[in-house]
Structures are given as C-alpha cells and as structure tokens.
Image (spheres, grey):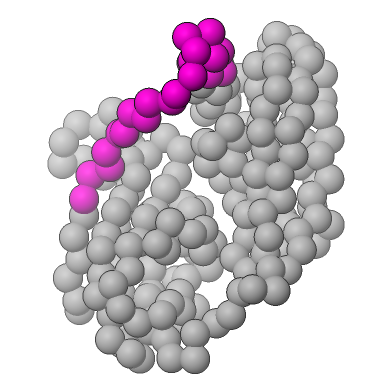
Amino acid sequence: MDDYRNRSSKNRIRNYPGLELRAHRRLVHALWSVLSAILLLAGMSYADNKVLGEVVLEGATKVEREAGVWVDNQYLGYMKELKGDKQILLLPGEHDIVVRQDGYLDFKQTVSIEPGTKSLVKVKLERDTRFQMPTVFSEIKLSVNPDRAAVFVDGQFAGHASEFSGVAHSLLVAPGHRQITISLPGYETFHSDVDLAPHQKFKLQTNLVKLGAPPGSE
C-alpha cells in the first residue's frame, strides 16, 4: 500500500483593501458567520431558541440531496443529513448558501434570515457542460471515519467519503500530483498529497480527529 502524508491545516489571514468602515463591516459579517456555525454545531433547538432562523433545503432529485452544502463559506454536510439535530440554524441577517456536486454547476443563493422564522430554499443543480472525465485515470479507494466527510481533489469538491469506499466504489482522478482534502465540521481537516501513475490504484485511510481532542486520540 502506498504511503501518504498527513499535513495539519493552516489558517491564513487575508488583508482586504478599502476603507476602515468597509473592513469593519466585513469583520462583523465574518464574526456573525463563525458564531452561526458554532450555534449550528452545538445543536441548538429551533423550537427553544427564537433568536435564530432556520433554513430548509429542498432538493429535486438524488443529485441535489447528496450534494455538499456551504453557508458563508463554512462546509456543513450534505443536504439530506441537514435536518433534526443537524438542521441549519442561523443568526438574523443575510447568509450565502452554496450547494456543490461533482460535474454540476454550483447553486448559489443569498437568504435573509429573521428571528424565529423558517426559510425554504429549493435547489436544482444543472450539469456543467465543461466537465469531462479523463481518458486515462487513476483510482483512489477511501476509508474514512466518519465517512460522511467531504472530499476535495485539488480544491474541487468531489463528493463524500462514503461514495468512494467499499466494493466497486472508488474516486477516479487524472494521473499526476493530486492534493486530497477531507473535511467535516467539528473535526480537524485532513490533507494528503499523492503522486499517481496512470491506472494506479491507491488506498487512503484515515480517522478524522475531533477538534479539541488530546494528541494521539482518534
């Protein structure tokens, strides 16, 4: 089995040009976004907390229901799991919703949230006519725990780990140097660089580490 490297994620601070007021507004928006994500991950109940608003995503087909969902650039999970204790609860204000599926154009919509309300967003994905499978490819078999984590290849969303594990399931990629990222809210992001030859079969296995877990724990 090939070796892989696990690199810790790095936080990058980006400087934005413009006036102080503009920068302040962006900072406030970012803080609201982070706080929304924290509230979501904490599992706060919509019925018990009327300060928050709920977003309900409705997908027309299996393609949409198994697509990845981002709110204000934060990955939350795939659409069909974002209900019950994983429902999307957000602070009042405007929030950017993005839904992604491999081989399809991104669905984007901005929603305005009011306290104690429920907003329905109907999602329909359209095929990306520019998308082409490589004529020669390599295979990556994934074994990831938890397997509902999102998988990215060279920064592009490819699907969820469960889609690329088990018998007759693997991730097909173009040969060469590939950057694999596996992400899930509440866990440290996993990174691995691999160099693949044409038709090579590669197995990548990892247990994601919960944020705040002691070193060496899984």
Magenta range: 7-29
Residue shown at 53% from the left, 68% from the top:
163
Along the line of sight, the residue nearer the viewer: 188 or 114: 114
- Confirm whether residue 18 shows in the render: yes
Residue shown at 29% from the left, 54% from the top:
191
Quarter the C terminus occupies: top left
Residue shown at 45% from the left, 44% from the top:
184
- Confirm whether residue 202 shows in the render: no
Q: In this rendering, would 35 be left or right of 121?
A: left
- The picture places residue 117, in percent across and down from the top left corner, at 82, 19
> Does 11 appear in magenta?
yes
> Does 189 appear in magenta?
no
Q: Image quarter for residue 48?
A: top right
Q: In this rendering, would 123 be left or right of 52?
A: right
- The picture places residue 87, in percent across and down from the top left corner, at 67, 33
In the rendered picture of this protein, how many numbered marks are placed on residues?
A: 0
Q: Is residue 188 above or below residue 29?
A: below
Q: Is residue 99 above or below residue 21?
A: below
Q: Residue furthest front?
A: 18
Q: Is residue 189 above or below residue 213?
A: below
Residue shown at 43% from the left, 56% from the top:
155
Quarter the N terminus occupies: bottom left
Q: Image quarter for residue 216?
A: top left
Along the line of sight, the residue nearer the viewer: 3 or 155: 155
Q: Image quarter for residue 199?
A: bottom left
